[in-house]
Amino acid sequence: MTVQHAIRTERLVAGYGGKTIVDGIDLEIPPGRVSVIVGANACGKSTLLKTLSRLITPLEGGVVLDGKRIDQIPTKELARTLGLLPQQPVSPEGIVVADLVGRGRHPHQKLFRSWTPDDDRAVTEALAATGVLELADRAVDELSGGQRQRVWIAMALAQETEILLLDEPTTFLDVSHQIEVLDLLTDLNAARGTTIVMVLHDINLAARYADHIFALRAGSVVASGAPADIVDADLMREVFDLDCRVIPDPVSGAPLVLPRGRHRLLAD
Ligand SMILES: Nc1ncnc2c1ncn2[C@@H]1O[C@H](COP(=O)(O)OP(=O)(O)OP(=O)(O)O)[C@@H](O)[C@H]1O
Ligand SMILES: [Mg+2]
């Protein structure tokens, strides 16, 4: 079991070119749990995740990790504690899978001491866990969207951080690989106490896999809590402008959102 790090934001304001996107957010990530951020396109989810991982400097307020502002934590130390899988990661041209995943080990390598058997173990484990071991020697550029996404997840896993931030880790994955990845992250959380924070667009998977949901609208948190406590038709209207029914998922018991739409409805 890892040490459980506490990460929170204090009146966090972030944006681009002076334009506010994340608008004064105070949130506490539950340590050792799985949190999911949901919200409409462009509401600021990725901006929030990037600010949490210091890719973006806040305009106001800040991010606090274990009582310390993250801008005061040395880069390598931060990278050993907190990993981010961005929404649209870019791989160096021509790189092969094993080398890309190996880059996840950089924060663990000491000056003048390079690759160790422990790095080998971490990379092999990550490749195996995400089901891409047989792609190890393939060029990343030549993979399918879903294969590539699993390679990126492998890279994030190989970093073996105690906090893992993932921006839409299930994009490009078919339904069975989506479940596999979410089960894998849940296993990691259970086995190592890894704190997981991810953005998911599928509200039903979010409701099923999250211990805690943060619902964002226009850069503010409008609801925060256990899925069963907060996911209902009113929240879906507020966050997504969606007309829907919410029933208990017969498979998991979590809230299941059924959008109404305008067509193909049963006659009343
Ligand atoms: N690098 C950037 N420069 C300028 N504006 C940006 C930049 N990145 C994002 N934005 C703007 O900030 C707003 C929020 O973007 P963000 O990527 O945080 O949204 P999101 O909630 O992750 O959306 P999505 O669900 O589509 O991924 C958008 O209006 C977007 O156009
Ligand atoms: Mg995004």
Image (cartoon, rainbow, N blue to C red):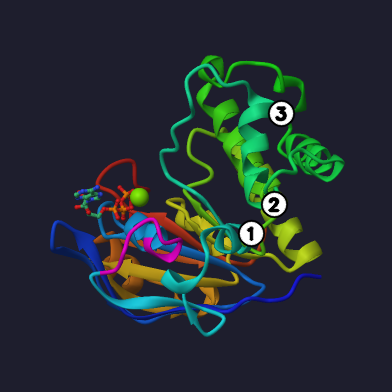
Q: Position of residue 215 (x, y in %)?
A: 38, 69
Q: Is residue 222 above or below residue 176?
A: below
Q: Is residue 23 above or below residue 93?
A: below
**Which element type, helix, strand or loop, lies under badge 3?**
loop
| Location of residue 259 by image quarter | bottom left
Q: Nearer the viewer, mark 3 or mark 1?
A: 1
User: Residue at position x 67%, y 54% from top?
Assistant: 185
Tell me the amino acid under the disc marked 3: Val
Q: Are marks 1 and 2 in contact (CB under 8 Å)?
A: yes
Around disc 3, counting alpha carbons within 10 Å, would you say few (fewer than 14), some (14 to 19), or many (20 or more)?
Answer: some
Which of 254/83 is in front?
83
Q: Which residue is mark 1?
A: 80
Horizontal side of 77 relative to 201 (left or right) equals right
Marks 3 and 2, how far apart in space? 22 Å
Q: Could you say where residue 187 lies in the image, as x and y percent from the top left?
A: 76, 57
Q: Is residue 137 above or below residue 165?
A: above
> Counting residues from the N terminus, which is met first, the one under dot 3 or under dot 1?
1
Dot 2 corresponds to which residue? 108
Dot 3 corresponds to which residue?
132
Stretch of the chain drawn in magenta:
51-58
Circle 1 — which element? helix
Q: Residue furthest left?
A: 18
Q: Do we see residue 235 in this rendering?
A: yes
Relative image position of residue 265 (x, y in whole percent): 34, 47
Badge 1: how crowded within 10 Å, few (<14), some, or many (20+)?
Answer: some
Q: Main secondary structure of the magenta part?
A: loop
Q: Mark 1: is the Cβ under 8 angstroms from ligand 2?
A: no
Quarter of the figure that contains the C terminus? bottom left
Q: Secondary structure at mark 2?
A: helix
| Cα distance between the residues tagged 1 and 2 | 7 Å
